C-alpha cells in the first residue's frame, strides 16, 4: 500500500538560476501568507475588484458591490431548465451557459455599502472570506461541495436580501433544539430553507419583499441557506465545513486506488455530520459506506450534471481500473489489439527506421530553441520520442547517436535557463513563470497552462532518462533539479511546501485540471485541452517510474483513473451521456469547458475545413495513455459523426493528428496512412513525429 500526499518533492528553495521577482499583478484583498492558489475557483476572489464569481457547487457565490446598498456575499443557483443554448441558428448548439449572478439571496447588513472584503485563507478546496463594515464582520467559509451557504455575523443585525423577492416566508420552529428553521418561497416559485444557529432566538422576519431582517444585533450568529424544503436538511443543519483536505492510497497488489475529500467542520448537527454535495464522477465511484449516506437530495450543477447530497464528512472514492500497466510501451484498449514485441517484424522495423532516419536529420537544437515554453516542450517531447524508439524498439545505435545527444543538449539549455525567455520565480503567488509578457506563451506568466507547458518538458525528460538514467544527476543534478522544479510548480502533492501551492492545476474535486490562471472570468476557470491535461499526468507517471518515486507514480495512476471517469462525462460525450444536456452532447466533445458554460470552440478558431481544431485539441498528443482515456467506442462515434467526412480534406498538420487518433479505434487504417509511400510531412503536426506514430501503431498490432 502506498500512501499519497505526505511526502514533499523537495523542501529546498527553487534553484538560484531563477531570478526572484514580484508579480506585477498581486492578489487583491489577500491576508494569506505563503503560496496562493492560482488556478482554482477561489482565485477569482483575489482578482480585479473581487466581485468575480466562485462556483462552490452546487451554489455560485460572489462579493456583491453593485448598487448603493445590500453589499455583501450573494448566491445563485440555476437549474437545467434555465440553461441558455446558442446561437439560435446552430443545431446542435455551439454553447450553453447558466444565467450567472442572479441575486437570489445576499448576506448583508443594515444599509451595507463600501464594504471591505479580504480572503483570510485559501487552499486547494476551500477559502474563507471576511467582509467588514465598521465594527461589523461577516465570515463566509467557502468549500467545494458544501451543503449549505453559511455566513457567521459578528456584532451586527443580519439582513438577507433578495433581488428576486420573497413571496412567502414562515417560521417552522426549532430544529434539534438548536436551529431556528424558516421556509421561504421566492417570486420565481422556488423554495428555500434558512436555518439560524448560535443565536436562534434572534428572530427573522420580512421587512419588505426584498429583505429578511433579524430582530436585533448579535454578538455572533450563524445563518445557513439551502435550496429546497426537504426534512432531510434538518439532521444536517447547524454544522458547516471550514476546510477540506485530500488523502489517498494505492494498492498495487490489489490494483485498487482510493482517495477522499475530508471536511473539517464547525458546529453541531443531530446526525453528528454535515451535508456534502457530490458530482456524478464521484458518486459513481463511492465506497459502500458513503453510498449508504445518500439523503435523497439532488440539485443541478452548472456544467457537471446532477449532484447528490450525502450526510458525511468525507467523500471516499474507490477505483479499480487504474493504468498500472501503461508505461513506456505502446498500449491500446481496442479489442483484438495489444502490444507485443513480435509485432515489430523486420519489414515493420524498416518502415519505422526510414522515418526515424529522415527525422533525425532535422535541426533538433534549432527546432527546440523557441521563445515559448509550450512549443519548446512539444519539440523536446517529439525528438525524445524518436530517441526512445531508436533505442527501445529499433535498437539502432546510429540513429540513437544522432538524435540523443542533441535532445539532451536541447533539454539542458532549458535546464540551465538559457532559453529565449528564461523562467523566474514569482515570490508573490509563489511559482515558476516565464519572463515573457502576460499575453505571450499563452499567459504562462499569469499561470495559464503550466501543466500543459511543463508536462511536455517532464515527458521528454522521462523518455531520455529511460535510455540514460544517470543523465538526470549529471552536471550536479542539472536536469533533475529542473524537472523537480517544474513538477513542484504544477503538481506539488503537499500543502506545506513554502514555495509552491498544492496541486496548482489538478482539481481533486472536479476530477480534472484547470488551465486558466490569474485572469478574472465571469464564467469561472476553464480548460481547453483534456488530452494535454492527462498527458501532463502521464509525464508524472513516467518520471516516477524512471526515478523510482513510487508515490509519484501511484499518484499519477490514481489521477489518470479519476480523469478517465470525469473526462468521459464532462469533456468526451458518448451517445448515452446523461450528465450533459442532450442537445449539446451531439457535438461529441466539449471544446472549452468552463465552470459556468461549455463552448464548442477553441481560443484559436474552429478549423480550416470543419471543426478539426475543436476535436483535435482533445487528442493532442496521442501517446501510450490516450487509449485509456479515449476509449474505442467514443473515438469511433466521434470519427463517424464529426471527422470522417472532413479528415482527407484538411490541408495541414491537423490531418495527421486526426489520423493517428483514428488508430484508437482502427489501428490498421491509421497504420496504412502513416506507412504510405507518398508521405507528405506537412500533413502532421509539427510537434508529432512519423517515427513515434508508426512505432505506436505497429506496436499495438496495426501493421498485422
Image (tube, rainbow, N blue to C red):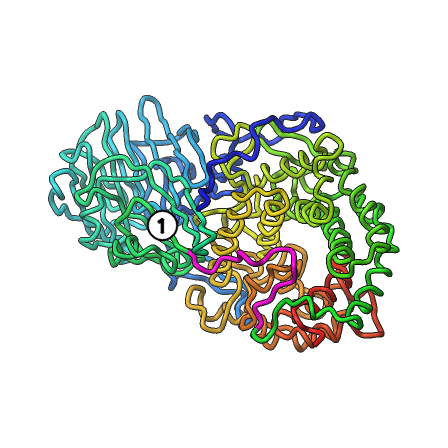
Is 455 contained in the magenta span? no
> Is the stretch drawn in magenta largely helix, strand or loop?
loop
Residue 65 place in picture, x, y as percent: 42, 36
The segment highlighted magenta reads: 319-334
Q: Position of residue 362 (x, y in %)?
A: 86, 54
Q: Nearer the viewer, residue 442 or 499?
A: 499
| Picture residue at 47% right of the left edge, 58% below the top | 566
Q: For the residue carrying disc 1, how many other residues have a C-alpha within 10 Å: few (<14), some (14-19), or many (20+)?
A: many
**Residue at screen point 82% across, 45% down:** 405
**Who's the residue at 30% across and 44% down the image?**
313
Reply above or below: 581 against 100.
Answer: below
Q: Nearer the viewer, residue 189 or 29?
A: 29
Residue 117 in view, yes or no: no
Quarter occupied by residue 304: bottom left
Q: 387 or 254: which is nearer to us?
A: 254
Please tell me whether residue 530 is drawn above or below residue 668 in the rendered image.
Answer: above
Q: Which residue is mark 1?
A: 316
Instruction: Give the quadrant of residue 434.
Output: top right
Left or right: where does residue 418 sit relative to residue 87? right
Residue at the image point whose x is 63% and y is 29% from the top: 14
| Element type where label 1 sits in the image | strand
Quadrant showing the C terminus: bottom right
- Left or right side of 397 for 609: left
Amino acid at each position: 500500500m502506498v500512501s499519497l500526499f505526505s511526502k514533499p518533492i523537495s523542501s529546498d528553495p527553487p534553484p538560484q538560476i531563477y531570478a526572484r521577482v514580484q508579480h506585477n499583478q498581486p492578489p487583491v484583498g489577500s491576508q494569506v501568507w505563503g503560496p496562493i492558489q492560482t488556478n482554482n475557483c477561489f482565485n477569482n476572489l483575489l482578482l480585479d475588484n473581487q466581485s468575480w464569481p466562485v462556483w462552490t457547487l452546487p451554489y455560485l457565490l460572489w462579493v456583491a458591490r453593485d448598487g448603493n446598498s445590500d453589499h455583501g456575499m450573494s448566491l445563485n443557483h440555476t437549474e437545467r431548465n434555465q440553461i441558455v443554448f446558442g446561437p439560435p441558428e446552430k443545431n446542435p448548439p455551439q454553447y450553453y451557459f447558466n444565467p450567472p449572478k442572479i441575486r437570489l439571496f445576499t448576506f448583508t447588513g443594515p444599509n451595507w455599502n463600501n464594504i471591505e472584503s479580504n480572503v483570510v485563507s485559501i487552499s486547494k478546496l476551500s477559502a474563507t472570506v471576511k467582509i467588514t463594515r465598521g465594527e461589523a464582520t461577516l465570515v463566509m467559509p467557502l468549500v467545494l461541495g458544501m451543503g449549505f451557504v453559511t455566513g457567521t455575523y459578528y456584532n451586527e443585525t443580519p439582513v438577507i436580501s433578495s433581488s428576486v423577492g420573497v413571496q412567502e416566508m414562515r417560521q417552522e420552529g426549532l430544529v434539534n433544539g438548536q436551529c431556528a428553521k424558516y421556509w421561504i418561497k421566492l417570486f420565481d416559485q422556488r423554495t428555500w430553507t434558512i436555518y439560524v444557529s448560535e443565536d436562534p432566538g434572534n428572530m427573522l422576519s420580512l421587512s419588505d419583499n426584498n429583505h429578511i431582517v433579524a430582530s436585533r444585533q448579535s454578538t455572533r450568529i450563524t445563518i445557513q441557506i439551502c435550496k429546497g424544503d426537504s426534512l432531510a436538511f434538518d439532521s444536517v443543519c447547524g454544522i458547516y465545513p471550514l476546510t477540506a483536505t485530500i488523502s489517498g492510497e494505492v494498492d498495487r497488489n490489489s490494483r485498487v486506488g482510493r482517495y477522499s475529500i475530508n471536511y473539517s467542520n464547525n458546529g453541531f448537527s443531530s446526525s453528528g455530520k454535515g451535508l456534502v454535495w457530490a458530482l456524478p464522477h464521484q458518486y459513481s465511484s463511492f465506497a459502500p459506506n458513503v453510498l449508504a449516506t445518500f439523503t435523497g437530495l439532488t440539485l443541478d450543477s452548472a456544467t457537471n450534471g446532477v449532484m447528490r447530497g450525502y450526510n458525511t464528512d468525507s467523500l471516499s472514492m474507490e477505483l479499480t481500473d487504474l493504468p498500472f500497466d501503461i508505461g513506456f510501451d505502446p498500449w491500446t484498449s481496442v479489442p483484438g489489439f495489444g502490444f507485443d514485441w513480435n509485432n515489430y517484424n523486420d519489414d515493420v522495423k524498416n518502415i519505422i527506421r526510414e522515418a526515424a532516419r529522415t527525422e533525425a536529420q532535422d535541426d533538433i537544437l534549432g527546432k527546440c530553441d523557441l521563445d515559448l515554453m509550450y512549443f519548446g516542450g512539444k519539440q523536446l517531447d517529439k525528438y525524445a520520442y524518436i530517441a526512445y524508439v531508436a533505442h527501445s524498439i529499433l535498437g539502432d545505435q546510429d540513429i540513437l547517436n544522432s538524435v540523443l545527444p542533441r535532445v539532451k543538449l536541447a533539454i539542458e539549455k532549458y535546464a540551465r535557463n538559457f532559453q529565449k525567455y528564461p523562467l523566474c520565480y514569482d515570490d508573490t503567488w509563489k511559482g515558476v513563470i516565464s519572463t515573457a509578457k502576460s499575453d505571450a506563451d499563452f499567459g504562462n506568466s499569469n499561470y495559464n497552462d503550466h501543466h500543459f507547458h511543463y508536462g511536455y518538458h517532464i515527458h521528454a525528460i522521462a523518455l531520455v532518462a529511460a535510455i540514460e538514467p544517470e543523465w538526470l544527476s549529471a552536471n550536479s543534478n542539472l536536469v533533475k533539479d529542473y524537472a523537480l522544479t517544474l513538477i513542484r510548480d504544477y503538481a506539488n502533492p503537499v500543502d506545506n511546501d513554502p514555495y509552491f501551492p498544492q496541486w496548482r492545476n489538478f482539481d481533486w474535486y472536479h476530477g480534472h485540471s484547470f488551465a486558466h490562471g490569474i485572469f478574472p472570468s465571469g464564467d469561472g476557470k476553464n480548460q481547453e485541452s483534456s488530452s494535454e491535461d492527462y498527458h501532463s499526468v502521464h509525464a508524472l507517471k513516467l518520471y516516477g517510474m524512471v526515478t523510482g518515486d513510487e508515490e509519484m507514480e501511484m499518484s499519477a495512476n490514481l489521477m489518470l483513473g479519476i480523469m478517465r471517469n470525469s473526462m468521459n462525462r464532462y469533456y468526451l460525450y458518448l451517445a448515452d451521456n446523461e450528465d450533459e444536456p442532450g442537445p449539446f452532447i451531439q457535438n461529441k466533445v466539449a471544446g472549452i469547458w468552463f465552470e459556468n458554460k461549455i463552448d464548442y470552440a477553441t481560443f484559436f478558431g474552429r478549423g480550416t475545413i470543419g471543426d478539426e481544431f475543436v476535436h483535435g485539441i482533445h487528442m493532442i498528443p496521442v501517446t501510450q495513455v490516450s487509449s485509456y482515456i479515449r476509449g474505442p467506442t467514443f473515438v469511433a462515434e466521434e470519427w463517424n459523426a464529426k471527422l470522417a467526412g472532413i479528415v482527407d480534406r484538411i490541408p495541414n498538420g491537423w490531418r495527421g493528428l486526426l489520423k493517428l487518433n483514428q488508430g484508437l479505434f482502427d489501428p490498421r487504417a491509421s497504420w496504412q496512412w502513416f506507412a504510405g509511400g507518398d508521405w507528405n510531412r506537412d500533413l502532421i503536426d509539427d510537434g508529432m513525429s512519423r517515427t513515434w506514430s508508426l512505432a505506436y501503431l505497429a506496436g499495438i498490432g496495426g501493421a498485422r
